[in-house]
Amino acid sequence: MSTCHADAVTFSELSRNPRSVAERAARLGRVRVTHRDAPDFYLTAADREEERDQTLATASRLFLALIKHDPTARALVIAMPEVFPWVRHLSSDELRAFTLELVEALSDAAELDVDATSQEVIAGWRATARIKADPAHYAEARKSTTGDFGSVQVFA
């Protein structure tokens, strides 16, 4: 069986030899299935995926409990620069807001299977840090505007 990576197979390999690919996925935990005309996906055992879900739920509940007992989220706020070095460009209030918003998004991912939200939260706050990191861009962004900038397209 030829593969791109040690843990990857092509879609055609899966089609030709599903038993071998399934055995490999069971042995390795998961196998990436590449497809030239579509996004890649993973083949994994259901029990392994359920364990991952339980791990995420436990971590998010732990973070929520920390915030519940410490509304300032001091321990989490202190850890954020190690995980996201760019937070140094955020104010203290922004850092606390980012921390709370991220913990809530992780909870949604764990409890409601809403995975995209946490990545959106990170991307939004990273964009805020990026603009604040450049004083000229930040000053430009803070200028007041006038006039009508046209219609806004909303994609659902």
Image (tube, grey):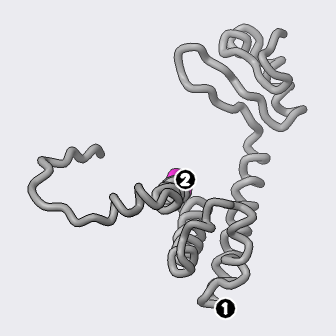
Main SS of the magenta part reads helix
Q: Nearer the viewer, residue 12 or 19?
A: 12
Residue situated furthest front in the rendering: 136
Residue on which the image places disc 2: 119
Residue 36 drawn at (x, y percent): 59, 14
Horizontal relation, residue 122 to residue 44: left or right = left
Residue on which the image places disc 1: 69
| Residue at position x 66%, y 69% in the image | 60
Which image quadrant is residue 15 in? top right
Give the alpha-carbon distance from disc 1 to disc 2, as whole Å.
26 Å
Visible residue check, residue 45 = yes
Amino acid bearing label 1: His
Looking at the rendered structure, the secondary structure element under dot 2 is: helix
Looking at the rendered structure, the secondary structure element under dot 1 is: helix
| Residue at position x 83%, y 17% in the image | 20
Q: Note whether 47 is above or below 139 in the view shown.
A: above
Horizontal relation, residue 65 to residue 37: left or right = right
> Does the magenta run of residues contain 103?
no
Residue situated furthest right in the rendering: 27
Residue 139 drawn at (x, y percent): 37, 63
| Residue at position x 70%, y 15% in the image | 10
Mark before the other along the chain sequence, 1 or 2: 1
> Does the magenta run of residues contain 115?
yes
Range covered by the magenta-colored residues: 114-118
| Residue at position x 60%, y 70% in the image | 103
Q: Nearer the viewer, residue 71 or 80?
A: 80
Q: Note whether 65 is above or below 59 in the view shown.
A: below
Amino acid bearing label 2: Gln
Visible residue check, residue 113 = no
